[in-house]
Image (cartoon, helix red, strand yellow):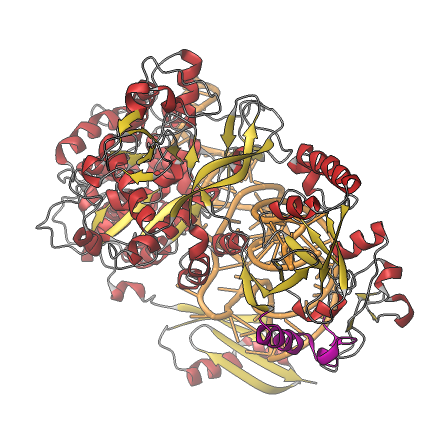
RNA sequence: GCUCCCGUAGCCCAAUCGGCAGAGGCAGGCGACUUAAAAUCGCUUCAGUCAGGGUUCGAGUCCCUGCGGGAGCACCA
């Protein structure tokens, strides 16, 4: 190990070895004194950068995932500081949430104490980890000083009609007796905590109307192209899931109101042969009411079965279609045909209008259903009729030849394959003969003219369910009057404080534990003083994190959530760093809230995070670390074994940040060795700080300055691994000059060592600071500005030009970097390698890219 | 099923605009130092870029097809 004692043969005074533990101990208090990472000085004239790492949930201690994100985020923050920016790099705690509450229930303690104990522990680790946070901006979402503004935010949305209560089907855990978020339901339909099969239950819950912003959330992603990982942009697009089509209204026999269906293929309206409604929809219940008792009974049985089925069963795409006829009929608005109405669970109650027009010839799901229940299939799009002059290719055979549709086998009723492709409309009245896209336009015109339909969009995105029947969260600032009215808590009465957990039964009962705090829940109605009750739900913690980046601007201001002037100066966040696990929910919610605050005039921008860096996961042996697999790498152990700097360096060096790091593929021991090597270089430097660099070894100086020139671009494109590799190269070159060149007194050695210390500050701050001291400077290498490369040293004295003949390298020439194309061509033509390989053949083309390459093409 | 990303040495990974396939590390080998070992230092082996085709003077890089791996969405009308 690096810190073992050297042999006794070393001369006195030279036996000092790299010892990360003592270096850590030495510098942490010095930095505490210096506070080099404060960003709040109003007189600071430097340009500003806002670098934000996703804040952690305080779960006990830091884990390797934290070690990665905070190492990488810190590279970026430290880099911009060295480039002359006043960098705001804040940190806080996402400290409300279920784990604290569950731990509290298990141990019979207060979630508050558990949470703040954890924070203290994690904060100590984080400080040791030498992340360059501005601790003066620290915040906790569970502090009343924070959640007061959460409640303020809720009220702003409420006033705009963007926060509302509705009855809806939610995930219900029948063992824990609580609502679950979608992400707490495992793919097999069981609860991730209790293991119980989750059922759907109808409850009144609070929602944020995020669907109002669906178009903007989707379209504004284009602005982020190039600055956000395309993977995340894609995931958000998928999640919002806009589809474009039409709403079509159908008359229902024996019913006043029409039923509206959404379809992406209104052109196939003449091919509709039945209608399907979601069995768990209000519409189904109402329609079946007008039917015979037998049908009602059959429907009831079916509905019960559907509601008992798990998500997994329901989502299995290959299962048999099921359904019941409701005994009712719809009328096709374009041709007056009677369409039987069925209830089937392949239609979802909460997508579109909970009802579809079934066109079995051109939709696979409808066709499967039609074949199961012997319903008619009518083809209205002729996919064999070339629309663009190209015959549709169904498949490629084993010889790579196209397989064309067989006229006799394309009837969906026979083949069971719906014809979903392009084609020319047939049997469709005024649409007959049109292409798909023209037919869609036309049918929308026809429907609109008759008031029976219109162009429409639909989204996969649903409104955001924000209420939780839990204790450890932000109370919803609404008071319910005895008459059922909702009264927002006046803003000057915020915050609505959480009642003391003492004496409250926090066990989930299906209603919020806050409801049992009688003194808290019973309040006079703010309007007329009559008895009223507080809303007892708390907010989803994603609300807390949807705007925390704004609270960092002025975390101690008790007069407003954030200062718009500060937002003007700092926001939006220039660089956001965090895990891809938040690619959808957190980022979508933060984008939504930012747009709402923009609309309310509080912000001048509409996207919160100008650039995003997603780091991968730290894994072990090819799989995710987990307690049950027993393949966990512990942060504390790694830091004790290898030191903070080696762990941080390993994170940066492992590969591209977005790739997963398999801890078995990387070598913290190797990182530690490199740090010791770099450190010894600084220790060996024997010249004084005022030595003239220009007298130093020119070869080493070139390596140093090439590094200075290249590293900034590499950091800015997040190629941290390459920067580290280049640093290793620099240290190797320096070592060589010390040992076998001009020696430790050479000025270039000092210059290289100083550059190494300065750059190493990005990855290994303790080692860098210690090197800086060894080199004769005052502490504070983190604030040393990045040195500019000397352009004269970037030009090599000579370069190697490659001469290719017919694409193969036939000679290499050492030439001046300023050589002209003509000179280089002449040299190339005369070179021995070219003479030999061209021989008798005729040269037909010569391409010269001075000074790098000459390419000669021959004939014969 | 739809959408997207990735295949370079035994392993992790580099390779600005298409211009010598190798910067760096791990592992391995040899050597120096040592009584020996560890540590340290020096030297060093190893791929022609998943496969096939195309464009080009020139392809790891661009295009097409296939194979392999990964991710997201999915009875979403």
Which residue lies at the image location 52% right of the left edge and 23% below the top edge? A177
User: Residue A337 at what x, y percent from top left?
Assistant: 76, 66
Question: Does A501 sit left or right of A443 as displayed?
Answer: left
Q: Is residue A127 magenta?
A: no
Would residue A588 be seen by someone viewing this image from the given angle?
A: yes
Q: Nearer the viewer, residue A81 or A51?
A: A51
Question: Between A142 and A404, which is closer to the camera in this rendering?
Answer: A142
Q: Nearer the viewer, residue A59 or A633?
A: A59
Please provide percent x and percent y for residue A769.
22, 37
The answer to whether residue A440 is magenta is yes
Residue lying at the far right of the rendered structure:
A408
* Span colored in magenta: A422-451
* Up-down relation of residue A172 to residue A570 (above or below): above
| Residue ID at (57%, 73%) | A448
Tell whether A845 sits left or right of A750: right
| Up-down relation of residue A47 to residue A553 (above or below) | below
Q: Residue at x 89, y 66 (%)?
A: A409
Note whether A420 is above or below A110 in the view shown.
below
Relative to A339, say whether A56 is above or below.
above
Q: Quadrant of residue A416?
A: bottom right
Quadrant position of residue A248: bottom right
């Amino acid at each position: 190990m690096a810190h073992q004692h050297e042999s006794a043969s070393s001369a006195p005074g030279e036996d000092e070895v790299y010892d990360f533990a003592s270096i850590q101990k030495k510098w942490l208090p010095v930095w505490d004194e210096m506070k080099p990472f404060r960003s709040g000085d109003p007189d600071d004239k430097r340009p500003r950068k806002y670098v934000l790492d996703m804040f952690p949930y305080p779960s006990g201690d830091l884990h390797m995932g934290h070690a990665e994100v905070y190492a990488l985020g810190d590279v970026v923050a430290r880099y911009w500081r060295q480039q002359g920016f006043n960098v705001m790099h804040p940190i806080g705690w996402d400290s409300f949430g279920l784990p604290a509450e569950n731990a509290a229930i298990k141990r019979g303690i207060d979630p508050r104490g558990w949470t703040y104990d954890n924070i203290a522990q994690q904060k100590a680790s984080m400080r040791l980890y030498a992340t360059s946070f501005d601790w003066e901006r620290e915040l906790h979402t569970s502090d009343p000083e924070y959640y007061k503004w959460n409640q303020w935010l809720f009220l702003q949305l409420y006033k705009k009609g963007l926060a509302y209560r509705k009855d809806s089907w939610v995930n219900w855990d029948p063992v824990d007796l609580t609502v679950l978020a979608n992400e707490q339901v495992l793919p097999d339909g069981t609860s991730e905590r209790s293991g119980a099969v989750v059922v759907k239950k109808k409850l009144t819950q609070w929602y944020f109307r995020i669907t109002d912003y669906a178009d903007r959330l989707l379209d504004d992603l284009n602005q982020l192209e190039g600055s956000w990982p395309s993977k995340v942009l894609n995931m958000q697009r998928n999640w919002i899931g806009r589809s474009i089509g039409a709403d079509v209204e159908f008359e229902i026999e024996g019913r006043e109101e029409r039923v509206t269906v959404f379809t992406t293929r209104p052109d196939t309206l003449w091919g509709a042969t039945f209608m399907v409604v979601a069995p768990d929809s209000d519409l189904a219940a109402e329609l079946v009411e007008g039917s015979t008792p037998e049908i009602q009974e059959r429907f009831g049985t079916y509905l019960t079965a559907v509601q008992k089925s798990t998500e997994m069963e329901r989502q299995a795409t290959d299962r048999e279609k099921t359904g019941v006829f409701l005994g009712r009929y719809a009328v096709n608005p374009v041709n007056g045909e009677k369409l039987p109405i069925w209830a089937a669970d392949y239609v979802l109650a909460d997508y579109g209008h909970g009802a579809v027009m079934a066109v079995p010839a051109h939709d696979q799901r409808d066709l499967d259903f039609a074949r199961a229940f012997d319903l008619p299939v009518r083809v209205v799009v002729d996919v064999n009729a070339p629309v663009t002059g190209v015959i549709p290719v169904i498949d490629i055979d084993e010889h790579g030849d196209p397989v064309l549709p067989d006229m006799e086998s394309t009837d969906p009723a026979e083949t069971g394959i719906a014809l979903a492709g392009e084609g020319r409309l047939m049997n469709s009245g005024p649409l007959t003969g049109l292409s798909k896209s023209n037919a869609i336009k036309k049918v929308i015109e026809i429907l609109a003219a008759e008031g029976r339909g219109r162009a429409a969009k639909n989204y996969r995105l649903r409104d955001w369910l924000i209420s939780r029947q839990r204790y450890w969260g932000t109370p919803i600032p609404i008071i319910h009057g005895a008459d059922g009215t909702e009264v927002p808590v006046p803003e000057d009465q915020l915050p609505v404080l959480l009642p003391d957990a003492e004496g409250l039964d926090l066990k989930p009962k299906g209603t919020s534990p806050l409801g049992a705090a009688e003194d808290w829940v019973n309040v006079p109605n703010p309007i007329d003083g009559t008895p009223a009750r507080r809303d007892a739900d708390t907010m989803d913690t994603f609300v807390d994190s949807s705007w925390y980046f704004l609270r960092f601007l002025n975390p101690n201001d008790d007069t407003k959530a954030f200062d718009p002037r500060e937002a003007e100066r700092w926001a939006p966040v220039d660089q956001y760093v965090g895990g891809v696990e938040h690619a959808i929910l957190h980022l979508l919610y933060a984008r939504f809230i930012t747009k709402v605050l923009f609309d309310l005039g509080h912000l001048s921008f509409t996207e919160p995070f100008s650039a995003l860096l997603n780091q991968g996961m730290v894994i072990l042996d090819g799989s995710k670390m987990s307690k049950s697999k027993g393949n966990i790498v512990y942060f504390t152990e790694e830091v004790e074994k290898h030191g903070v700097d080696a762990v941080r360096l390993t994170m940066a060096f492992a590969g591209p940040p977005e790739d997963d790091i398999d801890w078995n593929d990387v070598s913290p021991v190797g990182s530690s060795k490199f740090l010791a090597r770099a450190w010894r270089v600084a220790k060996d430097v024997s010249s004084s700080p005022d030595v003239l660099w220009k007298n130093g070894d020119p070869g080493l100086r070139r390596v140093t300055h090439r590094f200075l020139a290249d590293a900034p671009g590499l950091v800015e494109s997040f190629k941290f691994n390459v920067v580290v590799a280049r640093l290793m190269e620099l240290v190797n070159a320096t070592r060589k000059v010390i040992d076998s060149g001009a020696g430790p007194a050479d000025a270039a050695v000092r210059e290289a060592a100083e550059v190494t210390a300065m750059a190493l500050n990005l990855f290994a701050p303790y080692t860098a600071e210690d090197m800086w001291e060894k080199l004769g400077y005052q502490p504070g290498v983190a604030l040393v500005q990045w040195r500019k490369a000397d352009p004269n040293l970037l030009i090599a004295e000579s370069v190697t030009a490659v001469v290719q003949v017919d694409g193969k390298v036939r000679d290499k020439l050492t030439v001046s970097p300023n050589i002209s194309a003509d000179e280089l061509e002449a040299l190339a033509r005369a070179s021995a390698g070219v003479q030999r390989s061209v021989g008798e053949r005729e040269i037909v083309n010569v391409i010269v890219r001075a000074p790098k390459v000459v390419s000669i093409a021959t004939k014969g």
